[in-house]
Amino acid sequence: MKPAPFAADDELGTRAHALLGSVFGLPSFRGSQEQIVRHVASGNHCLVLMPTGGGKSLCYQLPALLRDGCGIVVSPLIALMRDQVAGLLEAGVRAAALNSTLAPWEADEIEQQLVSGELDLLYVAPERLLTPRTLALLARAKIALFAIDEAHCVSQWGHDFRPEYVGLSAIAEKFPNVPRIALTATADSLTRREIAERLGLGDARCFVSSFDRPNIRYAIVDKRNGPAQLEAFIRDRHMGESGVVYCLSRAKVEAVATSLVKAGIPALPYHAGLDANVRARHQDRFINEDGVVIVATIAFGMGIDKPDVRFVAHLDLPKSIEAYYQETGRAGRDGKPSEAWMLYGLADIVQQRRMIDESTGSDAFKRVSLGKLDALVGLAETAGCRRTRLLGYFGETPSFERCGNCDNCLQPPQLIDGSVAAQKLLSCAYRTGQRFGAQHLIDVLLGRLTERATEFGHDKLSVFGIGREFDEKQWRSVIRQLVASGHLVPDSEAFGALKLTETSRAVLKGETKVMLREQPAGRAPRVKSRRGDLVGAAPQLSNGDQPLFAALKAWRAETAKSRGVPAYVVLHDATLDGIAMTKPRSLDQLRGIPGIGDKKLEHYGRELLAVIEAAQR
């Protein structure tokens, strides 16, 4: 049962801390969580920006328990609802979800529970919430708060705009006195303004947590043979671990998943073209089994709570830094060492620009989209710390110049004066009529007598063969960097032909100096980075702790299977780590492990103590 409504602010704080421990098994709040909980529990609206894994869910779950009535959570995906409800039920919270998977009698039962005050939290999809039936139902119930999760979906400037979110402005109109909290992991200033406007938040307070995820190592690699590079990456660094691989097209998803399976890596495809039952089965395997790699389009991942995803790999360039950050943020939610690894090439820029140009969006939308793409290309081509560049995009000034946990910090690239190389490349593009792509320009610079070079007479030009000091790989790097710095632009209407820009003239005249990252000739050296080299926020187990950890994982797997829930719903890896390191011998000692609240102690306490005792014999 819920405690009685609070009477004073100090009482609120006492109750909040008590529930934090007894329900969620946590000893203390993180970051701005306590401020947000107090703010919403006191009846105020707010917008929360907090990175994936930063504890957003607690910011509305706990206020819903503190306030009188039921918290209504607007969530875009059935999988998210299912996992969150399962976790809450395990913790003793009265939670349910209204979605399309329910039989009519099941939905009727949940609706009755809502009206009669028997629910603490109810998850609803936006399109269902806005039906006349559901709105009438909510009008009959006592509502504690509205939480709009993945709030960036409401903005046309966000990376994952969903039209069904636009109608959520009705919440403010119909329930003006019920506190509303909108939450997202990614939103630039433009997106934040639109979220506040569309959800009727007005001058509501905005809580912005640090976007830094120090346990994630960022690396961006030149694309050569994507599937082969991915296979090597997984084999060298993450064999036997869970990961997500993002591709742009369904066909590529299928091809990459097949190649990984042939290489002995358990991988499953996930995209909108698959049968719904197949998608659900693949998602369930990924969530419930260890070491499964899911290969997916961006249709996969929003709201997936799996905490032990050890890597996220991109084989194609995302649309924006927001999309990149959101997708990479699905790695390492448990604070353990994880990697965000992306392949990147000039063809990616051409493809994304073509998609923007061919979209049905307005001119303003296309301008904003191109600006977001340019920012992402700038992240890919930077010679500085990738983390500081990433944080700077979201308006955050980090306390460090170099993070020590990205590829550029670990192996700093050398900068060279590339002005002459830039002049040669720009001259080549100009003299060949600005009608050709990277490969032909490189062929001309290297003096290759290709059929196209002789057909157009480019073998007679003064630029023919003037670039033999570089190899093809080095010239591709020069081209990408000139595109990133705005001196060249791919023409999507001419199949990626490279054209000069207004700034090119100053480069050609020698008025603008061009500094480039030095690209070694030939194949780049392969850098192995095993898990032990990675940085994590969570304490690491010693070798002596590993046997008990393995026994606890085996117990958890059996328990999760018997209860029909994902393993992490029973207990997170971080909680198993705490047990393995401290080896508690009593229920009281076990109660002090983060992640074990009253209900979980009641359900699993004696079993856990038995596992600990057996493993130490």
Image (cartoon, grey):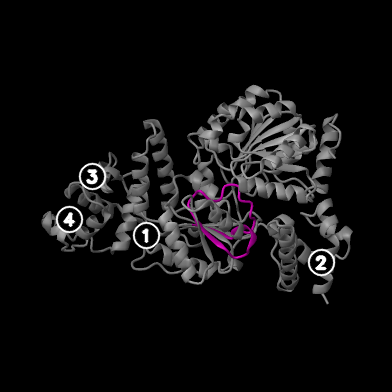
Mark pair 3, 2: CA separation: 70 Å
Magenta region, residue range: 286-313
First in sequence: mark 4 or mark 1? 4
379 vs 150: above or below: below
Q: What residue appears at the point 74 percent right and 70 percent down from the top-left corner?
A: 551
* Quarter of the image where one finds residue 29: top right
Mark 4 crowd level (few <14, some 14–19, many ≥20, 10 Å Cα)? many
Q: CA distance from mark 1 to mark 3?
A: 23 Å
State the SS at label 2. Answer: loop
Label 1–label 2 contact, CB within 8 A:
no
* Residue type at tag 4: Val
Name the mark on residue 509: 3
Drawn side of residue 599 relative to residue 357, left or right: right
Which residue is denoted by mark 1 in the rendering?
A: 518
- Residue 32 visible (yes or no): no
Mark 3 and mark 2 lie on one chain; the one further toward the N terminus is 3
Residue at mark 3 to residue at mark 4: CA–CA distance: 16 Å
Q: Splitting the image into 4 quarters, where does residue 152 fall?
A: top right
